[in-house]
Image (spheres, rainbow, N blue to C red):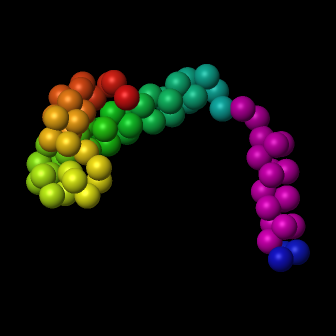
Amino acid sequence: MAQHLTTAQSNMSYLAGRRAMPVLAQWAVSFAVMLTKWSLRQRSRRQLKQLSDAHLKDIGLTREDAHHEATLPFWRP
């Protein structure tokens, strides 16, 4: 346990001592995260449309709820 704590403290010290990422790199990471979220959201909504009524019932959704969620644009949470 003490070894894990020492490693965690040393990792935190390393991160605290590092310079911040350049602004362009921060923007690029934010953009990549946003695209990933959009892609996952689009894929999830596409799969939601294909679920059977039994599967929708299992997760507590009606067909109307699933249709509403599936028709939202990918950029809307």
Quadrant that contains the C terminus: top left
Q: Is residue 8 above or below residue 77?
A: below
Image-quadrant location for residue 66: top left
Residue plotted at (20% across, 30% down): 68
Image-quadrant location for residue 63: top left
User: Where residue 48 sits: x, y (%)?
Assistant: 20, 45
Q: Which secondary structure is most common in the magenta stretch?
A: helix
Residue plotted at (85% across, 58% down): 9
Residue plotted at (51% across, 34% down): 29
Q: Taking 77 as reference, is 20 left or right?
A: right
Q: Taking 77 as reference, is 7 left or right?
A: right
Relative depth, front residue between 24 and 74: 74
User: Where residue 12 sits: x, y (%)?
Assistant: 80, 52
User: Where residue 2 sits: x, y (%)?
Assistant: 88, 75
Q: Which residues are magenta?
A: 4-20
User: Does residue 43 appear in the picture of this structure?
Assistant: no
Relative depth, front residue between 77 and 22: 77
Residue plotted at (37% across, 39% down): 36
User: Where residue 1 sits: x, y (%)?
Assistant: 83, 77
User: Does residue 62 appear in the picture of this structure?
Assistant: yes
Q: Taking 6 as reference, is 19 left or right?
A: left
Give yes or no for residue 3 being in the magenta stretch. no
Relative depth, front residue between 8 and 54: 54
Q: Is residue 77 above or below residue 51?
A: above
Label tally: 0
Q: Is residue 44 above or below residue 2?
A: above
Image-quadrant location for residue 70: top left
Give yes or no for residue 19 being in the magenta stretch. yes
Q: Taking 75 as reference, is 5 left or right?
A: right
